[in-house]
Amino acid sequence: MEIEFAGAAREVTGSCHILRINGKTVLLDCGMFQGRRSETRAKNATLPIDVREIDAVVLSHAHIDHAGRLPLLTANGYANPIYCTAATRDLSAVMLDDSAHIQEKDAEFLARRNKEAVAPLYGMRDATTAVDRMVGLPYDTEFDVVAGLRATFTDAGHILGSASIALDCVERGTRKRIVFSGDIGRAGLPIIRDPKPPLGADVVLLESTYGNRDHPPVADARAQLARVITETAARGGRILVPAFSVGRTQELVYDLHVLAREGKIPEIPIYIDSPLAIDATTVFAMHPEIFDKTEDLVQKVQELFKFPLVRYTREASESKALNSQHGPMVIIAASGMAEAGRILHHLAHGASNPRNTILIVGFQAEHTLGRRIVEHAPLLRVLGDEVPLRAQVEVLGGYSAHGDRHELQQWLDRVRAGGKAERGDPRPDVYLVHGEPEAQDAFAVQLRDGVYSSVLAPAPHQKISL
């Protein structure tokens, strides 16, 4: 048995890990890298392994940094199964189609600018083929992946359908239980259920996005959201929210629905300005069976994502018209790291207005526009122009869908505790993935100071034998 860390190694995006067992090869995720355009295109265009060697893919969730290169596999001839939860399959159908559209439009733009042909990474047909290869499976049910490898999905509590993956491996009489965390959510997030760790592990591949940070309590996020909207509306400004179309947008709409019902925000229009977010919200509504039934609004309201203040703008003409409207409003638009999509047009028009607020509600990777906004860069490069940043910037860490360092350790401790009965209280080997070096190094020290003696943050393409 061998694991190769082919993506999200010493960085946050591009999740991809290669498991080799009994002469078979399985990918855990196959996500896109995000960051500097010049670097990421080259990285994304290079597959970590020849598709003819891949026998199966097991996918943790639908976010593009975990699923975004699956159509590149099918474009290169991959025809084997992609295992995921049913909700992940449905979300991937809209997300990968959107990603393919972006690839094609980016290729057209680059071809015009460079006056030479630039092929897209993949097209919509490849995205459709990738979804056709997906096998949607329920949580907490074992399934065979390849010979000697059985897997089980448990709810990761990150986005709808997200999973941690327990992999029970047998090779030449040796048994190992590998747990891949995927992205671990937080207890108390709206709509989705709390994380449910697999029980017991010999090896854990653990995300570490916030391995050196603490989040404000989830319970405070809604009140902070109300404060930002109220203060910005009072000075006649707009609230511009770069938000991931899947997960974050739906959580924001849910909380805005609660605040509107309780009369805690002014009656200003709330625009969801993203076709992908609209489609993803439809998928959310299709899967009430995995909503958190303890949530008050889930119990009381059938239409979680519809209320009088919210408006969904699908057409580009509707989006452009927002820039000529007057008065306070909330605009939630992709992309979550402000690297593409309609949010760029709103930032180009609104980042220089001191009455406005740019509200950051998620992780911003290095070298992204969102990170530069968080760092209060005086000038932002938006759509080829320099825009002064005069708007207020608010960061609401309570909306993060990733656990902080204490929540990550609590999750790991529960994995370990769950295996005590049959494994005699083992201390699993821990491999930190999906994190920047500073976060990983600090988190490794924290874990080693506890009970975990074997903690490593693997380098890109580093291999370990089990």
Image (cartoon, rainbow, N blue to C red):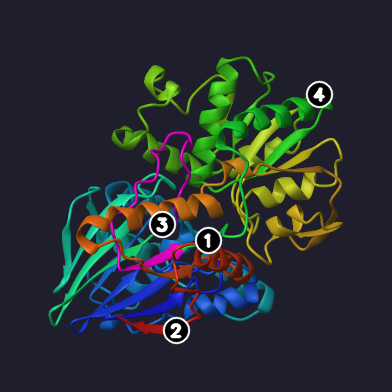
Task: Say which amino acid is labelled 4.
Answer: Ala
In this view, the mark in front (1 or 4): 4
Give residue 137's position: percent from left, percent from top.
22, 51
Examine the rendering and report whether any part of residue 253 can be seen. yes
- Tell me the residue that label 2 is attached to: 462
Mark 2 nearby-residue class (10 Å; few <14, some 14–19, many ≥20)? few
- Which comes before the other along the chain, label 1 or label 2? 1
Q: Which mark is residue 102?
A: 1
Verify CB contact (< 8 Å) between mark 3 and mark 1: no
Secondary structure found at label 3? helix
* Magenta stretch: includes residue 198: yes
Verify CB contact (< 8 Å) between mark 1 and mark 4: no
Magenta highlight: main SS: loop
Task: Say which amino acid is labelled 3.
Answer: Leu
- Tell me the residue that label 4 is attached to: 234
In this rendering, position of residue 99 left or right of residue 285: right
The alpha-carbon separation of the residues under discs 4 and 2 comes to: 53 Å
Instruction: Specify the segment rendered in magenta.
Output: 182-206
Which residue is at 69% across, 37% downward? 321
